[in-house]
Amino acid sequence: MNQNRFAALAAAALGSTLVLAGCGGQNPDSDSDSATGGSGDGISGEVRVDGSSTVQPLTAAAGELFKEQEPDVDVSVGTSGTGGGFEKFCAGETDISNASRPIEEDETAECEQNGIEYVEIQVANDALTVVVNPENTWAECLTVDQLRKIWEPEAEGKVTTWKDVDPSFPAEQLDLYGPGTDSGTFDYFTDVINGEEGASRADYNASEDDNVLVQGVAGSKGGIGYFGLSYYEENSDKLKAVQVDGGSGCVAPSIETAQAGEYTPLARPLFIYVSRKAYADKPHVKAFVDFYVENNQEITELAQFVPLNDDQRSKAQDAVSALGDS
């Protein structure tokens, strides 16, 4: 994950630990472990995670903080996209799959065929963010119809300049950047913007690495792209976020507008899928998942994701309990 972000995470977590230590008000009958305190369990091993590049920074942040508690546990987090992550997960190659959309029927069938049982846990919310180059002075707000005009399959080879999107825009060349077809972000965006999951023009710069998309838009005056809110916030000095009009006026992507349900239709849930077998058989996997959910509020806020609301947090805790019942 971004080193600046983790430095902030670690500093904030350390500060919380020092405050707790200074207060000395902990119930002696309660669990003495905190988000950064040592557990003394002596567990070790590797927690294997792959999937969504959007969820990757959050799970990586959880892993880095967990390592302060369990230094002999390594949490490795790959970014093959939500679809690519489910392929590995359902083949038994990973313990946890990061996902920016719910698992689909064909993926569920693949897991069932291979005997992979799992539990879905929502770990955050997201405001999928449309970004342009800072030199773009015309696209302050785009409607869903305008976004569809840019990204729909029929736009390929036809909508090539910003003027093609709106006559009031300049004839600046459109330079499109977006996630590849294995990405849950791609699936979600095409569904809510183009009306069909997977329906998109193909003549754009695709990458499963959101940092590549950031660099592309940052380097092109006519650039436009989309990815999770956290990547925009991490690169807000290089990019400009576009407000989106979902039918009720222009709304900027933010933690507040996503939680309030105002940022439509690009607010969405983010998940991890946990293998029941890995949770039951691997103490280090169980400890990490328990830590992730127990400290979820702090992790999401420090990692600049949109935290769960009270109902979502309760459901996540219930999901962990269901894992323990396996």
Image: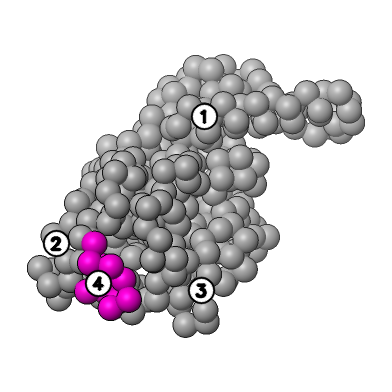
The quarter of the picture where residue 25 lies is top right
Q: Which residue lies furthest to the left in this view?
A: 157
* Residue to which mark 4 is pinned: 163
Looking at the rendering, the stretch of residues picked out in magenta corresponds to 162-172
Q: Main secondary structure of the magenta part?
A: loop
Question: Where residue 1 sits: x, y (%)?
Answer: 44, 32
Residue 263 location (% of width, % of height)? 52, 69
Going 40% across and 61% down the picture, which residue do you hit?
137
Tags 2 and 3 in contact by the CB under 8 Å rule? no
Q: Residue 250 carries which label?
A: 3
Q: Eyeballing the image, is 29 above or below 270?
A: above
In whole angstroms, how far apart are the C-alphas of marks 2 and 3? Answer: 28 Å
Q: Name the residue under label 2.
A: 202
SS type, badge 4: helix
- Residue under pointer 1: 4
The amino acid pointed to by label 1 is: Asn
